[in-house]
Every structure is written in C-alpha cells, then in structure tokens.
Image (tube, rainbow, N blue to C red):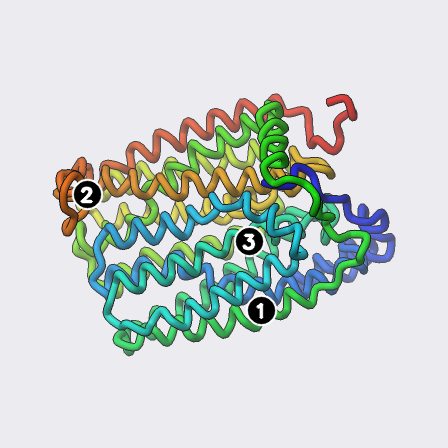
Amino acid sequence: MSDPGNSQQPHDDDDQPSGKSAEAGSGRGSGRGPLAGLLARLPESCHRPLLFDAAYNVGSGAFYCLTMLTGVILETILDGGAIHLAVFWAAAHGSSILSPLVGYAARKLSMKQLVVIPNLVSVVLLLGAGLYQDDATWCTMVLSAAFLVQVFPKTGEMNMYQVLYPASHRAAVVGILKAIMGISALLVIVASYFWFKYFESYYWVVFVAIALMLLVSSLCYGSIPIRRQDELPSHGDESPWAALIEGLRIFLTDRRFLLFQVGFALAGTANHMVFWMIPNLCHDHLEIPASETRLIAAVIPALLVTFSAPFWGRYLDRTNPMLGRATFNVIQATAFVIVAIGGTAGDKWLVVLGVVIHGISAGGSTVNWLTGSLHFAGSDRVSLYNAVHVGLTGLRGLTAPLVGYALYESGPLLADASGFMDGLEGFEMGPRVFWIAAALSFAGAATMLWQGLTDPGPRAEQPPSE
C-alpha cells in the first residue's frame, strides 16, 4: 500500500477492439473455442499477453489447487487434525495481509518480477514439502510458507490486468483465464485423487509435479510483452510510511469503496471461517471414507469452479460488481445452510449438495474478487485499491479460520500447550458453526444489493470532481 496511485490506462489503441477484431468476433469467431473467440474480439496488441497469461494460469492453477488438496492430504493421509487444516488455511489466505509490502517492493521490481520471483521461491518450498514424510506439522509449515509469498504474485497479477486488457473485455478475459486456471487445478486434483488411491505413501510426488508446472508457467509470465510507456510507474523517493498514511486517507474517504469492502468482508469472513472444515467434517465427524472425502472436499469444488467461471465472467460484464457479489453471497449462504443441516443430522448427501452449491458460487466469487476493485479505482488508484482489497482479504483470511476452529472444535484447542494456552477450550459447535457463516453471507448479500442498486457507475466514468 506504499503507492497510493501508480497505474495508467492501457494505451489508446487498446481502449476498444479494432474494427478488424470486432468483425472477426462477430463473424468467423462464432464457431471457435472460448479462448480463440476472445482473441478475435480483443485488439491485436492483447493477443500475445493473453496467450502467455493463459500459459501462466496453467501452472498457477496447479499450485492453487493445493488450497483444496492440502486439506485432504493432511486429513486423510498424514492423520492431521483440525488445527493443521485451520493453520494452513489461515496462512494460505492470510498471507494477503502482507500486501502493503507489494507497493514497497514495486519500487525496486517490475510487476512482472513481482509475479515471477516469489513463484520461484514457492517452487523451492514445494520441493522441500516431502522431506519429512508422514509429518503433518512439517507439511503444514512448509506449504504455509509457500503460500505466504504468493501475496506478491496475487497483487501483481491483478495490477497487470489494468495494463494488459481493455476495460470493456476485462471481466471476460479474467473469466477465461480463471477457467484455464480452474481446468488445470481440476486436472491436477483428479490426477492426485487417483494417485493417492493407488500410491498414497508417495503423496509428495504431487508436490514435485506442481513445482515443475509452476516453474515453467512463471517463466512464461516473464515473457509477457509490455511497452515501456505502459509499465506501472514507481515512486522510489517516496517514504513508505507517508505513502501508507496517504493511501489510508484516500481509502477511508472513498465511501463507495469502503462500503464495498464492508459487504465483501461479511461473506468473505464466513467463507474463510468454515470452508476449510469440509475435509474434517466429512472424514472425522461423518466418518466418510478417505477416498470419498477427497472427492467431496477437492474434486467436486474444483470441477464446479472451473466450469462456472466463464459464465459468471460474462454475467459480471453485464452488471456491476455489487449486484454480482450479492448473487454469489445468496448462493453461498444457501450452501452453508444445507451443510449445517446435513452435518448436524449426519446426512452426507446434504453436505455434498451444500458443497456443490458452494462450488457454483465460488467461480463467480473468484472473478468478482479479482476485478471488483477496478470499478472504484479509476485509472489512478489501481495499485492502492488492489493493495487495500488484498490486505483486507488477508486480515479476515488470517483470523476467520482460527475463530472458526475455536467455534468448531471440542476440548482443548492446543493439545500440547502449557500455561494459559492449556486452558483454552473449544465451543463445541461442530457443523452448527455453518449457521453463523450463513447469517454473515446473507448480511453481505443485503449490503451489496443495496449498494448495487444505488451505484452511479465506475469511477472512471464519473466527473473529475467526484
């Protein structure tokens, strides 16, 4: 957050598709696949970046499937407990709280380097994840560290969207890219599902394969061509503390963006509070076999996120981010109600239904999370608003899983603790904690619906005096 405004609009000839591209998109492109059709509608200058970006999302998807795979590995292979799942989820999603460091690092590195270099660090950590086999704590620590450094690629990639793609097609582009990412994640998860079924003791081979995919894809991202005048400028002589204070001032005085973040936080907190529990709920609480738990907690969500993302991307191009998020929040809340009922009643099929419904909403939530802030940022606050957005996501991503663990768990929260920590007991809510998550999601939907219905439009289209 050290840079309150360091982005430019894409160059003028990228603002709208050229006549040639538009003609191709309306004619011959109609019989092509989604990526080819999108290329036909985009300006020529966007084609190479999109192809390299697509290649990057193959490896990125393989890496991010670990957010689902790690839970089932810890739960069904390494005999980890709910504490391992909660700590990993908190680290993986709480890493975004470090987003203010991105603005500081951007003064020394380009946005492409902010994507590539941390990914190479994650590659090294992945290769070390299997050094101490059958150790849930080691696996949790190393994979958590691999995800902690991902705050840099995550924010850098979001900022690059502003430079690479015109606003008129940005959500559709992100939808396609995240579909590619999701397909990659799905294929890796399905392959891992069968690998664990027949070669469970060699689970670490999956980490090695994902590390190699992430390595190749990161090098592809480093090959994305960017014109010098479109690089995001840095402010090397600016005090990071002064920039932080100025950035907070801008954020706190932008009522629209502040309210957007409040609505986002309600449902986001709900999701981070409970979704990590699914492997433990299935395997320990409902006593579902390990193979079925992996199917429910990893394969089904990946499948649904993959195939729903392009649909939701097109939907978000036709509405504002708040109405889109309200839709996703209602779907998510419905899913959590069903999981709460099924988990409490011991009905695994209701839990499966809840996971399916949640997966449908998750594809749209991913696209909305990546592009929503641009509605408020205009052309001069992209880096700042993305840093705020990612940082607040990290705050709830870090705290909500730990709160959820305390509500969900029975008995001592830290079995080997001593002194004050030894007296901490769980609230023993079990699957009933999903009712709290459902209430938060409905509250987030109401907030977003109200703002969406009264929204005047993107900041870039408002008068300068706004």
Q: Is residue 317 visible?
A: no
Circles 3, 2 touching at the beta carbon (< 8 Å)? no
- Comes first in the chain, label 3 or label 2: 3
Q: Which element is circle 3 on?
A: helix
Residue found at x 41% / y 52%? 92
Q: Position of residue 298 (x, y in %)?
A: 36, 59
Circle 1 sits on which residue?
A: 217
Q: Is residue 182 left or right of residue 384?
A: left
Q: Is residue 298 visible?
A: yes
In this rendering, the answer to whether 271 lies above or below 352 is above
Circle 2 sits on which residue?
A: 409
In which quadrant will I find the C terminus? top right
Circles 2, 1 touching at the beta carbon (< 8 Å)? no
In this rendering, the answer to whether 391 lies above or below 260 is below
Mark 3 vs mark 2: in front = 3
Q: Is residue 302 left or right of residue 258?
A: left
Q: Position of residue 160 (x, y in %)?
A: 67, 52
Q: Residues within 10 Å of mark 3 (few under 14, many from 20)?
A: many
Circle 3 sits on which residue?
A: 152
